[in-house]
Amino acid sequence: MANLGSLASLPAIVVVVEVAIFSSFAAAQLRPDYYASVCPNLEGIVRYSVKQSMVKSPISAPTTLRLFFHDCAVMGCDASVMIISPTGDDEWRNHDDYSLKPEGFQTILDAKAAVDSDPQCRYKVSCADIIALAARESVSQSGGPNYTVELGRYDGKISTRNSVMLPHVDDNLDSLNAFFYTLGLSQIDMIALSGAHTLGAADCGFFQHRTKGRDPSMNPSFDAQLQGTCARQNSAFLDDVTPVGFDNSYFQLLQKGRGLLGSDQVLYTDERSRGTVDYYSSNQGTFFYDFSVAMTKLGRVGVKTAVDGEIRRDCRYPN
């Protein structure tokens, strides 16, 4: 089994995405049955491996889901976020990627090892596709939608620290929309994907400045709760009602002024997005459907082909 090595020292937090070039030509190669003839048991192998990872660590699901998001939003869905450069010039060592915890990387490495242990599949499935499948499994095995994953991505060969430019935890609606627009995603897509914050946690440093009455959009009782939490530990759940369950409670919390990050709560305080939050809070099925659509669209961003990509043997290093 592969191990993380120096990745194990990564700290925790939470954030979102970067600019990538959308290639309609490359995305056209994607299809759910891409590996049907060369690795027919692929989805079952990844499903079981992710299940094992989730048993080992309760944060495996949110960290794996976040890994897919960060990968696709920086240089496209090409597993470049997994690359370890001997010079230290790689994506995960950019400050904006410090939210990516070791458990997410290990989930992918374990799934890759499981896939390659099947003689039919060995060295035929890209790390990028394994990340996409593992993200879906993290969602569905946490109670969320079991959506279809398009496959056929190639792995990128380049990962640079300066390529990572992510939104900030206090971005307003205009900034969030502008960023997601560069990925070919709409405001509805952005709000649906933000619902992934029903899983996971954030370090206190990313929301403490909102406490002690400094952000009027924060519920006073929630403010006091967070002050107590951060006095005892360094992080808090994004959704403290169902922190390990994928559901629509995130949106219900926003209605009550209990969004942990400023970029979460703004989805309700801004009247232009409030209606969608209200609808998702009472219509979990619609949220699940829109989330599935948005994840599919995100998975088409910056897809590599055999011309500019490869099937990496070790997800951490280009061939």
Image: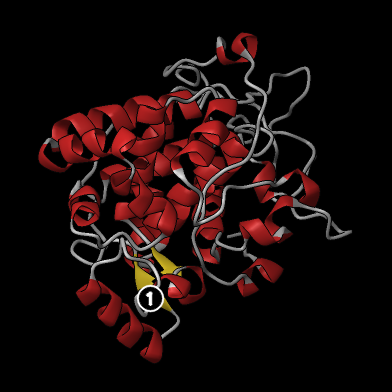
Q: Furthest-bottom residue in view?
A: 232
Looking at the rendered image, the quarter that the C terminus falls into is: top right
Could you tell whether 63 is left or right of 154 in the image? left
Rendered position, 255 above or below 185? below
Residue drawn 20% across the image and 76% down it: 221
Q: Is residue 149 visible?
A: no
Q: Observer-nearest residue: 85 or 258?
A: 258
Could you tell whether 30 is left or right of 267 in the image? right
Across and down, in percent, residue 106 comes to: 54, 59
Across and down, in percent, residue 99 comes to: 55, 61
Quadrant assignment, res 175 = top right
**To which residue does mark 1 refer?**
211
Rendered position, 5 above or below 25? below
Q: Observer-nearest residue: 173 or 11?
A: 173
Could you tell whether 82 is left or right of 58 in the image? right
Looking at the rendered image, the quarter that the N terminus falls into is: bottom right
Q: Observer-nearest residue: 84 or 126?
A: 84
Q: Furthest-left residue in view?
A: 282
Quadrant assignment, res 272 = top left
Q: Observer-nearest residue: 77 or 30?
A: 77
Could you tell whether 214 is left or right of 18 in the image? left
Across and down, in percent, residue 59 comes to: 39, 64
Secondary-structure class at tag 1: loop
Three-letter code, disc 1: Thr
Rendered position, 89 above or below 22? below
